[in-house]
Amino acid sequence: MSTTVAVVDSDSFHEAVDLIGGVDSLNSPGRQVVVKVGIYNPETGICTTVKTLNAITAVFDKASAIRVVESDSGAGPGLERLQVWADCFNDRVVPFNLSDDPETREVEVASERVPFSHILLEPNTFVSTHVPRRYEEAGDEDLMNMGFVTKNLLGLILDTKKFRFHDQLPTALIDMYEAVGGIDLAVLDATHVFLGWKKKRITVSPKLLIVGKDAFAVEAVGAHLVGFEPTEMPVLQEAQKRGLGVIDLDEIDVIGDIEAPKQMITKAFRGLLPKRERKARRME
């Protein structure tokens, strides 16, 4: 059976869910839903949109509770940063700062024992949603080529010194993925895509959602969208080494058009590069 990833316009999340076979098994009164959003500095706007988060929570209409979670970081307390999505919150959908949880259990991450919030380690439906980015500094891919919905898991670390895992990030991310029992639903919100070269930053808006139950397949499609080779991404290589997910695009059933928006993003990214760099890349 092939791994399916749906690529739809940003208004069509429910269609994407239908295309990947629905979420009935993940949506029941007996299951709470944990939605890990990703945001560092709220002022940048580099995060899942309110519209997309509302669509995610709406599809889990049978869940007894939905927690939208983040942790403290160098940019501030998790609960403050979650206010970006204040319009999404109600009696059933509530913000939750993982760093404030008094009940924790230790898990092993990159050979270190670290506390995790207990809600991550209880039976639940775990959703990860973030945005596609491609930043390069001095010609090198920064940490952004570690993934999007997968790199989002770094926010499960409760303290603010998350950077200590950067040197072994692929191992740390997949350790965290396994500790929480995997990602049940991955939603890459490509309403906007964020691109950068050195100090230049631009935003392009393909207005897409990339959705699937195999987070690594979603990462692979998202990586292709911004011009990375999925099988060369360290975090996807680590996942493959552990027998998790599908990362080869030839083995993923991509429903929807990813090539036209990829061309648009590639053109936009090349426009950031100096002429010499642009010419060198054409010759590769």
Image: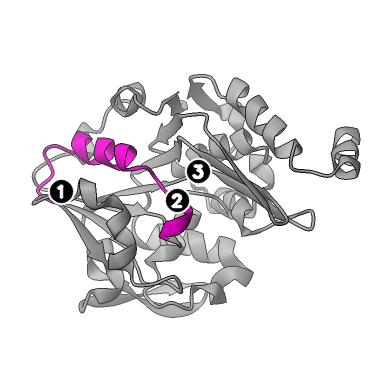
Viewer-nearest of labels 1 and 2? Answer: 2
* Distance CA(mark 3)–CA(mark 2): 24 Å
Residue under circle 1? 31
Viewer-side residue, 173 vs 156: 156
Residue plotted at (49% across, 59% down): 174
Residue plotted at (34% across, 60% down): 180
* Distance CA(mark 1)–CA(mark 2): 31 Å
Q: Secondary structure at mark 2?
A: loop
Inspect the image, locate mark 3, and give the three-letter code of the amino acid beneath it. Phe
Its colouring scheme is: one colour
Mark 3, Cα crowd under 10 Å, few <14 / some 14-19 / many 20+, is many
Inspect the image, locate mark 2, and give the three-letter code of the amino acid beneath it. Gly
Mark 2, Cα crowd under 10 Å, few <14 / some 14-19 / many 20+, is few
Residue 256 horizontal side relative to residue 60, left or right = right
Viewer-side residue, 274 vs 155: 274
Does the stretch in magenta take in 130? Answer: no
Mark 1, Cα crowd under 10 Å, few <14 / some 14-19 / many 20+, is some
In the displayed structure, 68 sits above or below 209; it is: below
Q: Secondary structure at mark 3?
A: helix
- Mark sitting earlier along the chain (1/2): 1
Viewer-nearest of labels 3 and 2? Answer: 2
Inspect the image, locate mark 1, and give the three-letter code of the amino acid beneath it. Arg
Residue under circle 3? 216
Instruction: Give the magenta-colored segment's residue range.
Output: 42-65
| Residue 227 visible in rendering | yes
- Mark sitting earlier along the chain (3/1): 1
Q: Which mark is residue 45?
A: 2
Residue plotted at (60% across, 33% down): 225
Q: Does the CB distance between marks 3 and 2 fall below 8 Å? A: no
Q: Secondary structure at mark 1?
A: loop
Residue 281 in the image, given as x and y percentages of width and height: 85, 39
